[in-house]
Image (cartoon, rainbow, N blue to C red):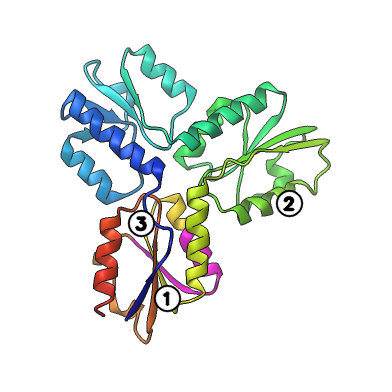
Amino acid sequence: MEVKVASSRGFCFGVEDAIEIAEAAVRDHGAGKVVALGPVIHNKQVVGALEKAGLDQSGDLETIDSSQAVLIRSHGASPETMARAHERGLDVVDATCVLVKRAQNVVKQLHERGYHVVMIGDPNHPEVKGVVGYAPNVTVIDRGCDLAEALPYRERLGIVAQTTHSPEHVADMIAEILKRPYREVKIVNTLCLEVTRRQEAAVALSREVEVMFVLGGLNSANTCELARLCKDEGCETHHIETWEQFEFRMVEGKRVAGVTAGASTPESVIEEFVKNLGKT
């Protein structure tokens, strides 16, 4: 089988930084002495490797011993969580992605300048949960939202978006907002360019192949978005985590396959998948 690989895929700098910070924290403090507030990134293989190295990813701030350090994962945390960690006298190791940190600061600044903050994103995603804590009464909207019900009327709106969302989706949501009679709408682009490049490359590749494979955590927002975009192009798409989940029926009758991966997927996973797929 001919296998084509997306020109932009896999680890982004934010994920690389978070892993390096986590590994350094374990080396400095010792195995079992660093506790992350949940999985550092949304990838089982990386999470497993970090746990094997001695990182605890239980995610419970209140049970962390004073002799341990707390690791803020790449998705960030709310101001309340950060304050509570310091209040308990814990050593805080911050692995928040710089772009997520920027979104946090933007939300804070918009509120201070008198805007009602609106965030386009998944309200259950850890990044969004952390970002909305930087201003009171942030309204979170996403696909399927009834804006008439979800978005209270304010004269001045300040809009940001979850870093992993696609520009097309964010633009569609903003277009719907602008149909309503707001006096002023300020839009700050908080999207991750690295993620956008991966989305563009995945869409382009999906137009050249008969079937697409999107590799990455099933709970990874940016990986799920890659799969959705490829499906929207009309290309048969399979979102799986590793080669072990591959089934021959996925490529039966196909001659050309495309492969891409989310921003938290290691290159080793991609290489193994491409190598094995090429032998089918």
| 235 to the left or right of 251 | right
Mark 1 element type = strand
Q: Nearer the N terminus, badge 2 or badge 3? A: 2
Mark number displayed over residue 175: 2
| 253 to the left or right of 208 | left
Q: Which residue is mark 1?
A: 211
What crowding class fits label 1: few (fewer than 14 Cα within 10 Å), some (14-19), or many (20 or more)? many
Amino acid bearing label 3: Gly
Question: In the rendering, at what x and y percent does residue 265 appear?
Answer: 34, 53
Amino acid bearing label 2: Ala
* Rendered view: 118 above or below 224: above
Q: From where the camera sits, is residue 58 visible? A: no
Q: Nearer the N terminus, badge 1 or badge 2? A: 2
In the picture, the quarter occupied by the C terminus is bottom left
In 3D space, how far apart are the residues under numbered discs 2 and 3 (Cα atoms)?
Answer: 31 Å
Q: From where the camera sits, is residue 23 visible? A: yes
Front position in the image: 232 or 16: 16
Q: Residue at x 17, y 34 (%)?
A: 54
What crowding class fits label 3: few (fewer than 14 Cα within 10 Å), some (14-19), or many (20 or more)? many
Question: In the rendering, at what x and y percent does residue 256 appear?
Answer: 39, 80
Tell whether label 2 touches label 1 (CB within 8 Å): no
Can residue 232 be found in the magenta stretch? yes
Question: In the rendering, at what x and y percent does residue 10 appear?
Answer: 37, 54
Mark 2 element type = helix
Q: Which residue is mark 3?
A: 216
| Image: magenta residue range | 225-240
Question: In the rendering, at what x and y percent does residue 132 appear?
Answer: 55, 32
In 3D space, how far apart are the residues under numbered discs 1 and 2 (Cα atoms)?
Answer: 32 Å
